[in-house]
Image: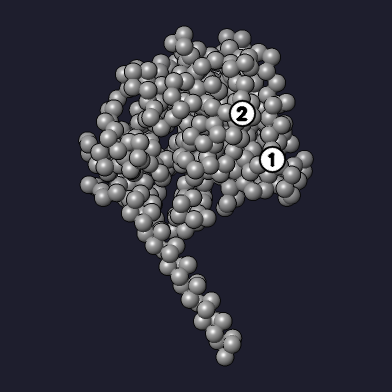
Amino acid sequence: MRLILIFAVLCFFYNETYGKVSLDIDKKLRTLNKPALKTIKSEDGDVIDCIDIYKQHAFDHPALRNHKIQMKPSVEFDTKKTITPNNGSSKPITSQIWSKSGNCPVGTIPVRRVSRADIMRASSPSHFGRKTHHRYSFLDNALQHKANFNLTAERLREPLNNRSEAIIVALGFNFLGAQSDINIWNPQGVQAGDYSSTQIWLLGGVSNTFESIEAGWMVNQRVFGDSRTRLFASWTTDAYTKTGCINLLCSGFVQTSTKFALGATVEPVSILGGAQYFIAASIYLDPNSGNWWLTCANNVMGYWPGTLFNALKHSATAVQWGGEVYSPNLMMTKPHTKTPMGSGNWASTRWNRACFHTNLRIKDFSMQVKYPQYLSEYVDEHYCYSTRLFRDTYMSEPHFYFGGPGQNPQCP
């Protein structure tokens, strides 16, 4: 009788808990999946909803309730043609797979539909699409760092965490924008609970509560439910503690483009020893509105409203280019994750084998778009991932190669 009573109590609490989680998931789905004026079923399995631009999730943010949409930036971030090394050639990505099946009409934005299964993979509905807390101690004195900056010494003082980066960093100035041509790969073997991204970061603030806006591509099974390479953007105003998210999975980023969908598949991807593909990406401040604009493949995607930020309200104090791996099995945890970064190959293998950023440019208060004057390379785990800034000739465009396999004999 006692066992039956215990069993009944356990069933009651299980049903109560499951019921609450189920209701939370339903609420999250209603919040994220706004009513569609048109629905497009992509050949890759995604469902793209064309949402009224004025009813997008961004405007659920308290700071944006009375926000007036800025349909286009008042300034542009100038770009220059990339020169590839070793007489190779790389081709730009100009569209996404879903657009083969239809287009969103004017006045709407394409939004990848979120499923119940997507949210159930998260630790909780409230954590869906969010990164975990991070720290960048070098930001505390970023404007004092220039040519003599020892990034390795600064980063070694940071506590061990669940992210591993292989990056090149520009410091010492107030930055109004940054860009690069981002080489696209589909790294094989990204573990189920991990993600691997290739991206640009613009950072401001102090180490433990920094602000960040980011863009690039990622493979993230936990969020998307597959191992495809997908376009992403991300932001935070408190070092990922409570604010920000990936793509449109929280309110904040205002999308204006009808042509590209954040979170949708990016193809074709580069082939080892063969054809190389890239997506041109830039993030820059509109000085007239204070909004930070994102451009991908020469297509204006939308913006992060300046009202979201404090440290990034007028400029950024650091720019990073490179790759990031998230996993609970990093640093001193053994065995190390097998999740690769970039193409999964070492930076030393270079053209058509290693992933790269090229056409690195910044804009500062001089208002000139230029190659960064001072750059510092850094790798969190140099036995697992790597970097190499390489210039084929004195006159050629530098390429920043990065990446690696993760677990290997030197990184057990």
Would you call the spot at circle 1 few (<14 residues within 10 Å), some (14-19), or many (20 or more)?
Answer: some
Where is residue 298 shown, x and y percent of the image? 38, 25
Q: Nearer the viewer, residue 353 or 347?
A: 347
Q: Residue 30 vs residue 162: left or right? A: left
User: On screen, 309 above or below 4?
Assistant: above
Where is residue 199 shown, x and y percent of the image? 52, 32
User: On screen, 216 above or below 362?
Assistant: below
Q: Amino acid at mark 2?
A: Ile
Q: Amino acid at mark 1?
A: Leu
Instruction: Please name the residue shown 51% across and 16% down the image.
Output: 174
Instruction: Please name the residue shown 44% across and 58% down the image.
Output: 117
Where is residue 370 shown, x and y percent of the image? 50, 12
How many numbered circles does the render carry?
A: 2
Q: Residue 115 vs residue 127: left or right? A: left
Under circle 2, the secondary element is strand
Upstream in sequence: badge 1 or badge 2: 1
Mark 2, residue position: 167
Q: Nearer the viewer, residue 37 or 70?
A: 70
Residue at the limit of the structure toward the bottom, as seen here: 1
Mark 1, residue position: 160
Instruction: Please name the residue shown 48% across and 34% down the image.
Output: 237
Q: For the residues labelled 1 and 2, say whether their Cβ atoms are less than 8 Å apart.
A: no
